[in-house]
Amino acid sequence: MDGRIIVVGFGPGAFEHITERARTAIQESDVIIGYNTYVDLIRGLLTTQDIVRTGMTEEVSRAQKAVDLAASGKTVAVISSGDAGVYGMAGLVYEVLIERGWHQGDNPAVEVIPGISAINSCAALLGAPIMHDACTISLSDHLTPWEVIERRIEAAAAADFVIALYNPKSGRRTRQIAETQRIVLKYRPPETPVGLVKSAYRDRQHVVRTNLGEMLTHDIGMLTTVIIGNASTFYYDDLMVTPRGYQRKYTLNTAEQRLRPGERLRPENEPWSLNAATQSEHNSTQSPVGPSTSTPAKDQSPRAFAEAALRRLSGTVQGAIPQTPRAATVPAAIFEVAVSPGVANKKFTSAQLVLLAQLAGEGGELEYTTAHQLILRTMTTEAEEVVATLREHHLTVLPVGDVIKVKACDFCDGEKFEGIPYAQDIANRLAGLSVEKELRIGFNGCAMACYGAVNEDIGLVFRKGKFDLFLGGKTTGRNAAPGTRVAEGIPAEEVPDLMERIIARYREDAFPGERFHKFFQRVGEIEGFVHQDRPAIVIADSVCGS
């Protein structure tokens, strides 16, 4: 049976901005597949279609499900907000098909329906900020290395693009937007207009007009699109406008133009153009002595005339494009690290706390986390010196983000000391290593297991010189559950090496963004430990108070 996949971009979410073809595609589909929020946004268009809803980070499973259903003869609509081909599902659907050997003309057929992307909808609310060259950059580094994103920001800022930032900030990704501001400030003044648009054309739409220097003082989240103006962008009342350059050849406040239509495209009247520069080089080669007949001003080449024109514009017209990057003081970068007194030690000394406060300063902050660490955030240009100072004061310093965190109990304030060396050894080997998703190793120092290590991704319970091992715990969500006990009585001296092998397998074979419990379920076996499906949870109504 011939199936179809229709990848639908439905725009910002408001019904009036959904194209007629997108509406028709949704209505003619047998199955709708989408992120929970997207399904809710188009609920008014749904009739009898089957609905497949998934949460955030489940894009791959959505694409695979769409391909499977279409292969069975279904017409499947995979929905994305904005445009499905701009950070949407279109590319991923094709990637999954390609992995299965699919070619155009094979079953299923694929259609991509365009929608209004966030850069367009947000620009319309701000005025006309993308009238000239613009680019989009996603600040999410879950799938793209930050080093790559950083180079793209640098290139876009240096080339004077208007920049639209997607996925600028989340609960865990807080540094990326600050680093972006720091980079762009190297090339543009703090007064550069910036628009912040949250939930464009949805119920909670919120628009803020600010500037590059003050943008971080406003609320920015995953639903925000940040549009940073270029060197010529300006505010007029509440409108953010980027001129295209008509003021260079046209008189905008009179009906009569200085140049007639037939004169407007001559090289002498657009001395900044490539044609004018080429003609200038040709003339200088052919007639090294004496001015060229096409020279627009006496004793001045087109290139020199263009440079003089741009200098004049920079003094009289807002936003002339600079020919070299703006010389500016590079602000200090935001630096953040996780700090703790140690694996088993939970006590900061007063001197350590004073030091942390001093390093944070007035503009920094200290955040206590459930991993028994303080996150130190501070503005500095001397990160290595900060780390050295912390370690001189006997503090453990580790990176933050998607890394391994070793959480241990306090071993009854050190009284149950037998397991401490093993906890320390595991922490020395693994804590701070980068992984696809934050992974926590919980460590209980005795069989009482009062610390709750069994609920972490990997749980270790020390008893009588041996370990019980738990894998695949999940601490949050509707399906939160402890890990499965996969082994009892592992000799203590074997456990650090075993942990290294388990982590190495996860780091090597995990999908992008895949959490450990999902990885264990998918691969089915790690180091001989077999995944076991949890029994179904039966929810029963109980008498109040029972």
Image (spheres, grey):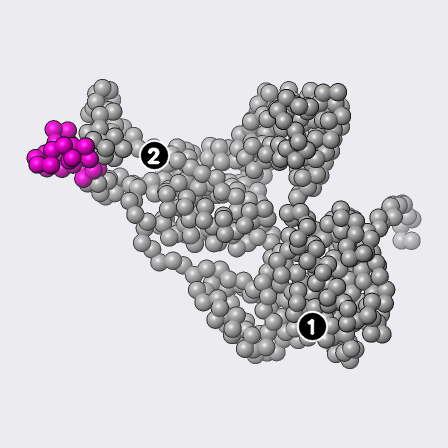
Magenta stretch in the rendered image: 280-306
Q: Between residue 189 and residue 96, name the one nearer to us.
A: 96
* Figure check: 420 above or below 100: below
Q: How many marks?
A: 2
Determine whether, in the image, residue 158 is placed left or right of residue 49. left
Residue under label 1: 424
Question: Which residue occupies 74% across, 70% down?
Answer: 409
For the residue carrying disc 2, how many other residues have a C-alpha within 10 Å: few (<14), some (14-19), or many (20+)? some
Residue 292 belongs to the span the image colors magenta: yes
The amino acid pointed to by label 1 is Gln
One can see residue 151 in this view? yes
Determine whether, in the image, residue 461 is placed left or right of residue 270. right
* Figure check: 409 above or below 534: below
Question: Which secondary structure lies at badge 1?
Answer: helix
Residue 15, image quadrant:
top right
Considering the image in quadrants, where does the N terminus appear?
A: top right
Residue under label 2: 243
The amino acid pointed to by label 2 is Pro
